[in-house]
């Protein structure tokens, strides 16, 4: 079973290059372009269960620090 990674970055080039590299290494990658979308994927039961979440610090809507704070506040994603 492939490890799942949630990748969030608002720079399209960085997002695509990183996604392709991780997939080449055998990971399943869900890529999103802002913090709000990252939270939506992390909280969605059908999308949840990520082994790793990689966040850009400076993103629109919610930055990486805000996303981590909201993930820590929710019991289903706190760990």
Image (tube, helix red, strand yellow):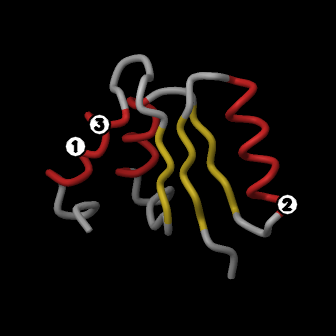
At which x and y percent is residue 45? Answer: 40, 59
Q: Which residue is mark 2?
A: 24
Q: Which mark is residue 45?
A: none
Left or right: where does residue 77 sit relative to residue 35? left
Tell me whether the residue at label 2 lies in contact with that at label 3, contact meaning CB atoms closer than 8 angstroms.
Answer: no
The one nearer the camera, 9 or 32, is: 9
Left or right: where does residue 26 sit relative to residue 15? right
Residue drawn at x 38%, y 29% is: 36
At which x and y percent is residue 53? Answer: 47, 54
Q: CA distance from mark 2 to mark 3?
A: 28 Å
Q: Nearer the viewer, mark 1 or mark 3?
A: 3
Residue drawn at x 21%, y 43% is: 69
Q: Which mark is residue 70?
A: 1
Q: Which residue is mark 3?
A: 65
Disc 1 secondary structure class: helix
Residue density around tag 3, few if under 14, some if 14–19, many if 20 or more, within 10 Å: some
Q: CA distance from mark 2 to mark 1?
A: 30 Å
């Amino acid at each position: 079973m492939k490890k799942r990674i949630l990748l969030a970055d608002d720079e399209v080039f960085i997002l695509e290059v990183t996604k392709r590299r991780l997939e080449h290494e055998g990971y399943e990658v869900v890529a999103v372009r802002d913090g709000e979308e990252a939270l939506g994927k992390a909280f969605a039961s059908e999308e949840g269960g990520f082994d790793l979440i990689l966040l850009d610090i400076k993103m629109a809507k919610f930055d990486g620090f805000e996303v981590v704070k909201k993930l820590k506040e929710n019991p289903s994603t706190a760990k």
